[in-house]
Image (spheres, grey):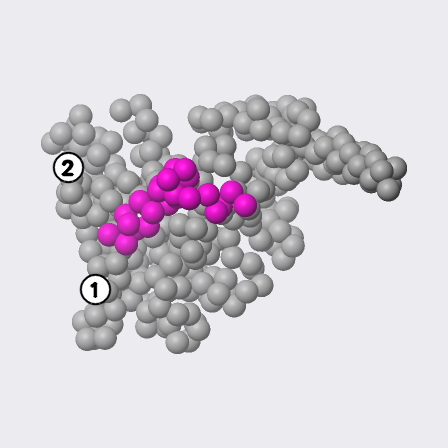
């Protein structure tokens, strides 16, 4: 009996050692990339701030398509329009699914870009998105954007030292006007302030290596909130999200119900809810609604804000 136990122990040890030997290593057939560290992969080399700088350096060294290892998971980075078109566009059926960090799933519940591309919800949300981002629809948004940009120029002339705040107000106001039919005339204490506070929370939740590896060790998800700062941050993000869009969503529902539409995008989605086959929460979470023409402005405002 002891010899059998020793044999099992030795076999188990050899198996674990063999698995750990390859853990974090780049498998054959993957695109090239920076050298890996045993078990950790490329985690020690990941930049904590301004990651695009390091990613650009790796692209110059390893090419427009390269790979990174995070423990036993693989990340393939595309750094050119040609690579994106060749892989995500021409091979969309096999490359459209996205990995969703558990911290985001726990916070948002529904996040379209991470849904399975073969699911009904993803297809319905895509249909709604296609309608909202069609060329004729985009042309109709120009008047709102022009008004907000003129307001931005006026505000910058009036108080140039507050330029970062003015950019943030404009960004949020463009979005809320197009999506919910309600503009934001000032930043302090407004929906714009809530929006960017929520954006910071989501960015912190999605930041790699700032939280326990919940996606690799699911048991860590059950750690009580008192010892899990990410759970407190997630709760805060939910509260901010609800404070930001709950009343705006109800306002749009009432406008459709009463026939007093403002012509905003969310009203169109609410009106097509039955046709799309989406429930109320799914309509509220149609992701591109809050990103109409604002993605680059948000990034610019955040990066600029880092230097203000």
| Inter-mark Cα distance, 1 to 2 | 29 Å
How far across and down, in percent of the image, does residue 217 sit? 57, 42
Name the residue nearer the viewer: 245 or 292. 245
For the C terminus, the quadrant is top left
At mark 2, the secondary structure is helix
Q: Which badge, 1 or 2, is on the more N-terminal residue?
A: 2
**Residue 246 drawn above or below residue 163:** below
Residue at x-position 63% and y-position 47%:
87
Q: Is residue 232 magenta?
A: yes
Q: Please, is residue 250 above or below residue 215 in the view?
A: below
9 left or right, relative to 221: right
Assess whether residue 178 is covered by the magenta stretch.
Answer: no
The local crowd at label 1, few if under 14, some if 14 to 19, many if 20 or more residues have their Cα within 10 Å, is some
The residue indicated by pointer 2 is 154
The local crowd at label 2, few if under 14, some if 14 to 19, many if 20 or more residues have their Cα within 10 Å, is few
Task: Name the one closer to the observer, 17 or 153.
Answer: 17
Residue plotted at (24% across, 44% down): 194
Residue at the image position 47 percent from the left and 61 percent from the top: 126
Where is residue 89 drawn, in percent x and y? 59, 51
The dominant secondary structure in magenta is: helix
């Amino acid at each position: 009996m002891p010899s059998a136990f020793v044999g099992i122990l030795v076999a188990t040890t050899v198996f674990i050692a063999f698995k750990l030997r390859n853990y974090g290593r780049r498998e054959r057939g993957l695109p090239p990339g920076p050298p890996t560290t045993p078990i950790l992969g490329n985690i020690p080399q990941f930049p904590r701030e301004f990651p695009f700088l390091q990613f650009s350096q790796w692209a110059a060294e390893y090419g427009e398509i390269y790979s990174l290892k995070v423990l036993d998971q693989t990340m393939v980075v595309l750094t050119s329009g040609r690579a994106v078109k060749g892989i995500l566009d021409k091979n969309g059926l096999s490359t459209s699914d996205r990995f969703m960090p558990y911290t985001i799933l726990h916070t948002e519940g529904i996040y379209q870009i991470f849904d399975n591309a073969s699911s009904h919800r993803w297809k319905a949300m895509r249909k709604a998105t296609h309608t909202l981002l069609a060329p004729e629809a985009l042309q109709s948004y120009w008047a709102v954007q022009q008004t907000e940009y003129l307001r931005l120029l006026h505000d910058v002339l009036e108080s140039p030292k507050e330029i970062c705040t003015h950019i943030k107000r404009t960004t949020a106001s463009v979005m809320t006007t197009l999506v919910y039919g309600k503009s934001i005339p000032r930043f302090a204490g407004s929906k714009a302030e809530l929006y960017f506070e929520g954006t910071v929370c989501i960015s912190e939740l999605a930041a790699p290596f700032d939280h326990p590896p919940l996606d690799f060790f699911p048991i860590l998800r059950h750690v009580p909130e008192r010892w899990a700062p990410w759970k407190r941050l997630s709760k805060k993000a939910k509260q901010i999200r609800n404070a930001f869009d709950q009343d705006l969503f109800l306002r749009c529902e009432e406008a459709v119900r009463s026939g007093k539409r403002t012509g905003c995008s969310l009203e169109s989605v609410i009106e097509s809810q039955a046709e799309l086959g989406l429930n109320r929460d799914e309509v509220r979470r149609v992701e591109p609604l809050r990103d109409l023409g604002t993605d680059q402005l948000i990034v610019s405002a955040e990066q600029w804000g880092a230097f203000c």
